[in-house]
Image (cartoon, rainbow, N blue to C red):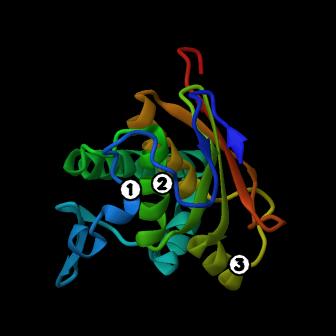
Amino acid sequence: MRGFDNGATFSSRPAVLESPGDLNVMDVDWRTEVTRQGNRVTLAGSSVAMHCHHYNINLQTMLEETLGRAGVELMFRAAELSTSHGFRTLLARYPQIRTVKSKIELAETLHQTCGMGLIHFREAGANLSRAESVSSHHVTGWLAKHGRRTKPGCHFTRGWIAGILSVLFGGEYDVIETSCKLVEGNVCEFIAKEKTDGH
């Protein structure tokens, strides 16, 4: 467990509620919040795309090969914008989720509920945040289909983290993957820093 610049601490265990009346993520009725009507999946009434590693792996390969860095940025921004919209919509339905700690727990649960895998924020603050993923559906699929890469490739997850942080703290974030299971090791690690005017 590590400290955060806003005074909150996080661990992989369920959060202890910080203030009376704060809603626990377990109180969210996921059966009604995540619904399916035909081929349409909604979260809190907004359409969402459930994670499909087959589609995302092919999309990522095509964007990296055809557009290079611009393709990577497109994946990052699409994830950032769609995540911030969806998370903001969900939080609006649960105004009793007030603390950063409880919102982070909700975000981690949302990541898993949408089929993306496990992610844990180890530090969360307006200026600096750290997250790690020990289990990613995308990474597992990529390794099975393509094997190892020479450089990190979790662009969607980087954008997802940026989107969550933008809702929590109001800024824009650069997210760097400092360790990637696609390259080596057993965990993907991310550092997010608030963008400044000069980046």
- List the residue tagged with mark 1: 24
Q: Quadrant of residue 171?
A: top left
| In this rendering, position of residue 165 left or right of residue 187 | left
Task: Classify 10 Å Cα crowding around label 2: few (below 14), some (14-19), many (20 and above).
Answer: many
- Distance Cα–Cα, label 3 vs label 1: 35 Å
* Residue 21 relative to residue 73: left or right: left
- Which is more N-terminal, label 2 or label 1? 1
**Viewer-nearest of discs 3 and 2:** 2
Q: In this view, does 31 lie above or below 196?
A: below
What kind of residue is marked 3?
A: Leu
- The answer to whether marks 3 and 1 mark residues whose Cβ atoms lie closer than 8 Å is no
The residue indicated by pointer 3 is: 143
Q: Which of marks 3 and 1 is in front?
A: 1
Residue 92 coordinates in the image, percent (x, y): 22, 45
Tag 3 and tag 2, C-beta contact below 8 Å: no
Circle 1: residue type: Asn
Choose the circle earlier in sequence order: 3 or 1: 1
The residue that disc 2 covers is: 105
Q: Residue 40: where, in percent of width, then height?
A: 21, 75
Q: Is mark 3 on a helix, strand or loop?
A: helix
